[in-house]
Image (tube, rainbow, N blue to C red):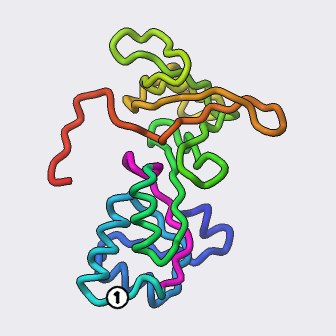
Amino acid sequence: FEAAAKRGCLCLPGGGLSSEQRLRAILDHGVEHLFCTPTYALRLAEVASECGMNLGAAAVRKLILAGEPGGSSSTLRLRLREAWGGAEPFDHYGMTEVGPVAYETPGGEGGLRVILDSYLAEVVCPETSEPVTGEEEGELVLTTLGRAGCPLFRYRTGDIVKSRWGEDDAGQPTLDLLGGILGRADDMVVLRG
């Protein structure tokens, strides 16, 4: 929020507003970028339909999705594009403990690319902590490289991923999380959605 405001963007926080009030603010102010969870973007589309609001006429062109798995799901992305008048979804991954971890894999079709300049990343078997090889599923483990005020060593995120190591056009190493965050390794309980 602060970074966008510093760049001169008009930022509208939605805390304390109902879904209908948020939608009215989005439409009234010509909001172009919406930041929320994937399921809340769907919920807003449902509320818009219930209230007779036309999201196809909204100025929203980009949906930045974070906070839960699903932002890289092709089915969900298609539903969001249709509901939001063609707005382009982008998956994003970060954590309070370590900061922004990954951005949408270049190409815009879902999946995440870890910011290797900021993290030493590993993928391990959740039960044995042994490294996972190839494109097997495992738990993402991160060591922060540039966070002086919040250094973490081999932080077990609890997030299940399918990883692929490679390199970009400039020959720099890449770590892509195929399909984004796929689930959780811990005992997380979901209540009411």
Q: Residue at x 81, y 39 (%)?
A: 169
Q: Is residue 151 left or right of residue 13?
A: right
Q: Residue at x 57, y 63 (%)?
A: 2
Percent position of residue 131, x then y: 50, 12
Q: Is residue 39 left or right of residue 59?
A: left
Q: Is residue 139 left or right of residue 119?
A: left
* In the foreground, 189 or 46: 46
* In the foreground, 127 or 73: 73
Q: Is residue 23 inside the magenta stretch?
A: no
Percent position of residue 6, x then y: 65, 67
Q: Residue at x 27, y 78 (%)?
A: 47
Numbered disc 1: secondary structure: loop
Q: Is residue 109 left or right of residue 58?
A: right
Q: Which residues are magenta?
A: 58-72
Q: Residue at x 33, y 13 (%)?
A: 127
Q: Amino acid at mark 1?
A: Met
Q: What residue would you read off at disc 1?
A: 53
Q: Is residue 67 inside the magenta stretch?
A: yes
